Amino acid sequence: MATPKIPTPAVAAAQAAVGNRSGVRSNEASGIADALLRAPVPVRRAAIKTLDSVDLQHVLVEVERETGSLYGLWADTPSGFIEDVLGESIWSKQRDIVDAVPKYKRTMVPAGFGVGKTFIAGRLVAWAGATNPVGTMLVVTTATRFRQVRNQLWPHIRKCVSRAGLPGFCDEVQWKIPDQWNNDVRVAYGFTAQAHDEASMQGIHGNPKLLIVVDEAGGIARTIGNGTNNLLTGEAALLAIGNPAMDDPRSWFEVMCEEGDDPEEPTTVTIPIATFDSPAITGERVPYCLDCPRSVEPHSLAVHLPDMDWVNRTIREYGEDHPYVIAKVHAKFPKGGGGKVIPVTWVEDAQRNEDPTGPGWVRLCDLGLEGETAKHTVRRGSWVRLGVDVAADGGDEFTIYRIVGDAIEHRHHSSGSANDNQVKVAKKILEEVHAAERLAQALGSTAKVHVKIDKNGLGHGAVGMLEVWGENGKHHSEVIGVMVSESPDRDDPGATMRPFRKRDEMWLASRALLQPDPGTGSGRLRLRVDREAAIQLTTPNLGNNAGGHAVVESKKQMKARGMKSPDRAEGILLAVYEPHPRRRGLIA
């Protein structure tokens, strides 16, 4: 069995509690183990540090005999286990979270950005699996999507088990420990439940104790969240941790966090961690980081946590009232879902959507075309389309985005003198048209490249020049001028959202493609775009006019509240948009 990594400085108070012994013999270890198990946690932890490694091993053997676990001394102190056994550094809020779990049925943690929520959830799993006798505790971890379970939480768990020498072995999402008969017993595993499958949370019982860890809890569906309550019987506990939902009013996570603030609900506690709680901002003294390789210069744990520069930049980029700031800086729930045309989480999901692989799919960088360096995959035969937003007066930004099938990427942006006349603008667009045509040919696409250009201001002249160049054989693409102030191409009186102008129609079309499907949990687009574009997609508010039409906040209104003109976002919208009746679908 592995020996815990215990610091060894003497602590006088602890020595007095269990006796100042040196050279502990096996017949003495039983008495010391019993005294330690009965001692208050602070006294016990201090006393443990007075024992050398040999003495400690004798004591731990007796602890295992009495409790069923080599790590039974830490069964009631998760923070002590993390610091003493795993040998890792945590800070005050993280300590509050893990130590609340043995005391409450439900521990809810709405967390800001970068405060170590998944880190601490992984350490809690290690504590629960190691400090309970094999076969008496089952830890179940879940998240909105399986890749979050597999790629975010379980790497932390595997690191804890291997680095601290905990018993058993971990595979991708499972931890097994041999029992006394050398049978491998599963003590922890990860899975993802379908959003509307209530039965997926059944059948998890079977052990005397149960711990459910819900990572990324802000995205958990109500049916799944409510299903966890059916499991919290007997010695069962729940930790739900994640960013507050930005686009789901009255989500399960929000309701449970409110319950944790209600004094009449004593079995539930809510412990928020705002980004402002970060030690890099509060100045809280924290230990040295023990997670980085030894070759790295010693540094404070606070180095890895968000600071005021990150907070200030985030507020400046999104705006103080943006749902992203409310959720990820203040760790609060935006009321009414934020009122945005495109919710932040939809854009984040589209950025995380995995690239398909297999027959028929190829990476752009593998096509051997000049300038094609992107590593995301595209499907052979896919349509290739460009969206061009031209700064109306040479100010703001001139942007070009490209969509190949369902994958959108940034191609160009410039401002100022780089696009102060229509000739410069048209020549740059022509360069991208030629690149798009080469790509379409390499992919074997039979459709013409569509180039959608905002005709306002300089865009009108650029459209005219590109049309003439097409007639003269300088390119073979279809140039489509789009006047965003015109009436929409499609207007269904029975639709839930009826756009008022073409600009509104474009925003709503992209919204529909980014909206996650209830069955798969994913939208229909993959966003491989720059950070600024992603922010701009989530910036405009959505409203209604007197006629009941959906109206997207104007650029003028956005600038009045300190936001940039969404030129990059509208380049994306133009790339996606197909004026009726040119195509029935939006994606090939």
Image (spheres, rainbow, N blue to C red):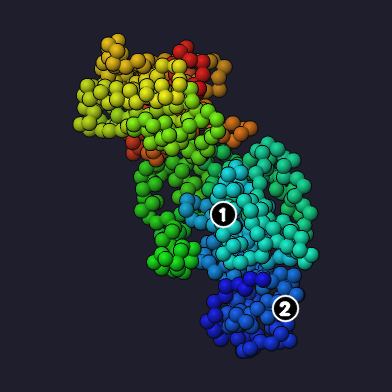
> x and y percent of residue 64 in the render?
72, 73
> x and y percent of residue 7 in the render?
54, 77
Please tell me which residue is depicted at 43% across the width and 37% down the height of the picture.
Answer: 375
Residue 3 lies left or right of residue 411; in this view the side is right
Q: Earlier in the sequence, mark 1 or mark 2?
A: 2
SS at badge 1: helix
> x and y percent of residue 320 in the render?
40, 44
Which class describes the residues within 10 Å of circle 1: few (<14), some (14-19), or many (20+)? some
Q: CA distance from mark 1 to mark 2?
A: 32 Å
Q: Residue furthest front?
A: 368
From what the image shows, is residue 142 above or below residue 430?
below
Q: Which mark is residue 155?
A: 1
Please tell me which residue is depicted at 60% across the width and 80% down the height of the picture.
Answer: 53
The amino acid type of the residue labelled 2 equals: Glu
Q: Which mark is residue 62?
A: 2
Please tell me which residue is depicted at 68% across the width and 36% down the height of the picture.
Answer: 196
Foreground residue, 477 or 321? 477
The amino acid type of the residue labelled 1 equals: Pro
Can residue 577 be seen from the camera position used here? Answer: yes
